[in-house]
Image (cartoon, rainbow, N blue to C red):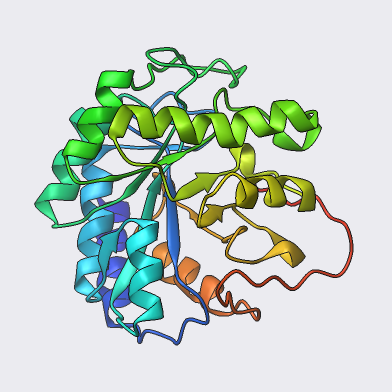
Amino acid sequence: MAAESSAHRADARSSRLRPHTRRQPWILTYHSVTDPSDDPYGITVSPERLDEQLSWLRSRRLTGVGVSELLRAGASGRRGLVGLTFDDGYADFLDEALPVLRKHGCRATVFVLPGRPGGVNEWDPLGPRKPLLTHDDIRRVTVAGMEVGSHGLYHQDLTGLSDEELRRETADSRALIGDLTGSLPEGFCYPYGFLDRRVARAARRAGYSYACALTPGPLLSRFALPRTHISQADRGVRLWAKDLRHGLRQVTVAGAGSRTAVPVRAGGPR
């Protein structure tokens, strides 16, 4: 009980912390929204915690939107928005995450795997196995007003693929999502957050207008947008600290430009 009271006091303090100036758009990374009790990778949040996190954003006059909307708003000078992304295309998005997003008037980008319709997250050796969106589910995500982006076909480390395999993961996944939803997706998300210059070029050539990474380092650009991983542990003060850390990044994403110096493979915590 004492720990819970202390957490509430910390959250209350965080709501009074002053916002800072962000040099580039803030994009949050979610994955699965369900019971987080079996979560070896720290990528699951409960619907209740998602509700709490979105409430925190609202207390700071921030509204969650998809990445395409966020980038368009930034170009027009509109403020008060934060990007919400859900990676891997877990089926729990429709039943668990979507109702919470609607409650808070938020939108999001869902990065799906059209090559694994109705499959499971076989790429996670520690499990647990979680069902993925079917093709019909992907259509339902679009009808619900969410942005659908590509996470590739099969959730592979793209930096280790041949040129033809890389083309399929980027271009063919885009075409398949376009057939499913009636609109070619604008956004791509690199599995595991891994990319290099060749992979970033492939995303651009496939016709996407942006691509998301996690911690892209010197590859930072519109085709390697940084994001902030969100977990079950993130509440008021931790969220504020992550916002602050993001705001201290020194390189600004300007259009499709990129400041790169040496070859690098960028990635993230997973």
Residue at horizontal 44%, vertical 24%? 114
Residue at horizontal 57%, vertical 22%? 154
Which residue is most to the right?
A: 262
Position of residue 106 relative to residue 120, above or below, is: below
Quadrant occupied by the C terminus:
top right
Position of residue 221 relative to residue 158, above or below, is: below
Percent from the top left, x then y, of residue 16? 28, 82
Is residue 93 visible in this depiction of the protein?
Answer: yes
Percent from the top left, x then y, of residue 124? 58, 21
- Residue placed most toward the observer, 164 or 125: 164
Looking at the image, residue 214 sits to the left or right of residue 99; the answer is right
- Residue placed most toward the observer, 262 or 172: 172
Position of residue 64 relative to residue 156, above or below, is: below
Q: How many marks?
A: 0
Residue at horizontal 33%, vertical 41%? 183
Percent from the top left, x then y, of residue 241? 48, 70
Percent from the top left, x then y, of residue 74? 39, 77
Residue at horizontal 59%, vertical 53%? 214
Is residue 34 visible in this depiction of the protein?
Answer: no
Q: Quadrant of residue 256?
A: bottom right
Position of residue 252 relative to residue 178, above or below, is: below
